[in-house]
Amino acid sequence: MIDRFGGKRVSAQLCFALVILIVLFGGLRVAMSHWREGATLLGGALLLAAVLRGSLPAERVGLLAIRGRVVDVLLYGALGLVIVFVAITITGGPLSG
């Protein structure tokens, strides 16, 4: 689908919108004091971004394409794994519950 604002494809931003939607939901869970679930969702959003960036052509990933494909996949994946690892392994603390 071609939009009338510059001729770019609107569907190219759907992957980015999906990742942002998960990030927003994760932020909402953190704000509701469910930090472990929220952090896991944030890490999962980054892992989804890595999968989408690695598997889709450059024309379809939209704003997920920041650097080269390999660099994007490695950085999204590594940061997502670190966030998920921290979220599931930290126990106790003032926010536990």
Image: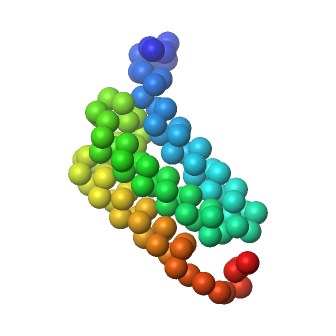
Quadrant of res 65:
top left
Q: Measured from the top left, where is residue 43 in percent x and y?
A: 49, 61
How is this picture coloured? rainbow
Q: Nearer the viewer, residue 82 or 12?
A: 82
Which residue is drawn at the image coordinates 32% and 36% (left, top)?
56
| Quadrant of the rendering where the C terminus is positioned | bottom right
Q: Residue at x 45, y 55 (%)?
A: 46
In the rendered image, the vertical position of residue 7 relative to residue 76, given as above or below? above
Q: Horizontal placement of 83 versus 56: left or right? A: right
Q: Nearer the viewer, residue 17 or 52?
A: 52
Q: Quadrant of the N terminus?
A: top left
Q: Is residue 92 left or right of residue 6?
A: right
- As displayed, is residue 6 above or below residue 88? above
Residue placed furthest toward the bottom: 93
Which of the 4 image quadrants contains residue 47? bottom left
Task: Give how far across and how far down residue 52 sits, in percent.
Answer: 37, 42
Q: Residue at x 65, y 57 (%)?
A: 27
Residue 38 in the image: state x and y as whole percent. 62, 62
When the figure is inspected, residue 30 is found, relative to residue 89, above or below; the finding is: above
Q: Which residue is located at x 34 percent, y 44 percent?
A: 53
- How many callouts does the rendering have? 0
Question: Eyeballing the image, is 95 above or below 2?
Answer: below
Q: Nearer the viewer, residue 48 or 71?
A: 48
